[in-house]
Amino acid sequence: MEIGVYNAVSAESMIKSAIENNPANQIEYYGFDFFQNYSTEQIGQKLGALGCQYKLIKGNTMNTVLEAANTLPLMDIIFIDGGKSYQEASTDWKGSSKLMHDRTGLFVHNVDFRGVGRMLDEVPRDKYHVETFYPRSEGMVALIKLSS
């Protein structure tokens, strides 16, 4: 699952990595975005070419993620790269955290933005393990997992 699809470069990378260990038709991708710069049709063509199953959810993630969290399956990988304000990041986290299981890796991009960093500071460390790192050519990223 990805929040903040934009041009689907990250989506393609995640799906291609998953295909290394799974048949493409067994991979499910859920993408949330406004789809203003790139339409759902454009993104759908990219994802369809990979052979995976996908669902694109258009709209403001402050509404769509929380609503969808009630019906989506638990996720193996979640990538939050949406809005950078505290309110947006917090809402994305609240919805996404409902979709975690004991092996989910939830990645948060742009942790060095004030709003995203504040959200990360509020993740309860008694329930979640949080690790930050700096991928090459990126800002700070966090990996959140349920504590064992």
Image (tube, grey):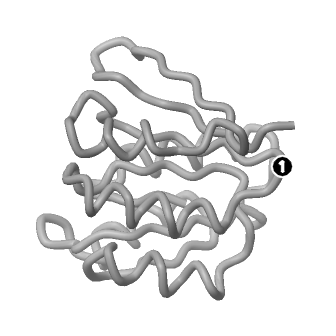
* Percent of width and height locating residue 54: 56, 73
| Residue named by callout 1 | 102
Look at the image and tell me in which quarter the C terminus lies.
top right
Please tell me which residue lies in front, 53 or 6: 6
Picture quarter containing residue 26? Answer: bottom right
Residue 66 x %, y %: 48, 79
Q: Compared with residue 142, is residue 128 higher up or lower down, i.e. above or below? A: below
Q: Quadrant of residue 129?
A: top right
As shown in the figure, which amino acid type bears the numbered disc 1?
Answer: Asp
Hey, which residue is sitting farthest left in the picture? 37
Residue at the outermost right position = 148
Crowding near pointer 1: few (<14 within 10 Å), some, many (20+)? few
Depth check: 97 or 41 in front? 97
What residue do we see at 41% from left, 16% from top? 135
Q: How many marks?
A: 1
SS at badge 1: strand
Image coordinates for residue 89, horizontal then vertical, percent: 33, 55
In this picture, residue 119 sits left or right of residue 16: left
